Image (tube, rainbow, N blue to C red):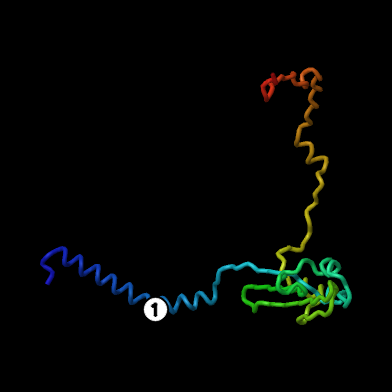
Amino acid sequence: MFDHPCRRLQFTLTALALTGLAACSSLNEASVKAASVVSPYTIDVVQGNVVTREQLAILKPGMPRVMVRDVLGTALLTSVFHADRWDYVFTLKRQRSEPQSRKVTVFFKNDVVDRVEADDLPSEVKFVSTLRTSVQTGELPVLEASPKSLEKFPVQAKPAPVPASVIAAPEVVYPPLEPPAK
C-alpha cells in the first residue's frame, strides 16, 4: 500500500490533521465552559456628567444658564439647532452587570431655565457607594524614622560655600543681528 516513503509521510500528516480537526469540536464545548468561568478583566467605563438628586434639587425655573453650568457642569450635548436645550447624559458600564444610563435635559427660555426633565437619579451618597474601590483598609505603616534607624546613615558634612566670583558668569558679547545702517 505504501511502497514510497513520501506516501507514508503524506498519509501520516493527513491522519494527524483529521485527528486535530475532530478534537476541535470537543475542545469547543470545553472552551465555552471554561470561558464562562474565567473571563478577561474589563475596566469600568464611566462617561458623561454625573448628576445627582441633590444637584437637580438646586435647579429652579428662572435660573440663568451660568448658574446651571455652575451646578451641573458643562452639558455633554449642546446643539446649534437646539440652543435652548442642554442634555446631560451619564453611562456606567461594568463587568458582569447591566449598563446604567441616566439623562437630564434642561430647557431654557430667554436664557433662563424653563423646565427640567430627568430620569430617576440617585443621591450622591448612593452613587458613591456603588463605585468599587481597590483601597485596602487596614493599619497604615508608621512613616517616622526612629533615632536608632537614622544611625545607619552617616551624617554628611555641609559643603563649603562657593565664592561669588566663581558663580558669576563671564560677560559675553554677541555680534549685532542686523548690519549697521549706512
Residue 42 relative to residue 3: left or right: right
x, y (%) of residue 129? 77, 72
Residue situated in front as seen by the camera: 87 or 96: 87
Looking at the image, residue 134 lies above or below residue 61:
above
Q: Is residue 129 visible?
A: no
Q: Residue at x 54, y 75 (%)?
A: 37
Rendered-image quadrant of the N terminus: bottom left
Residue 182 relative to residue 124: left or right: left
Looking at the image, residue 9 lies above or below residue 103:
above
To which residue does mark 1 refer?
26
Count of numbered marks: 1
x, y (%) of residue 175? 68, 20
- The residue most toward the front is 182
Residue type, numbered disc 1: Ser
Quadrant in the rendering for residue 100: bottom right
Rendered-image quadrant of the C terminus: top right
Q: Is residue 126 visible?
A: yes
x, y (%) of residue 3? 10, 67
Quadrant in the rendering for residue 88: bottom right
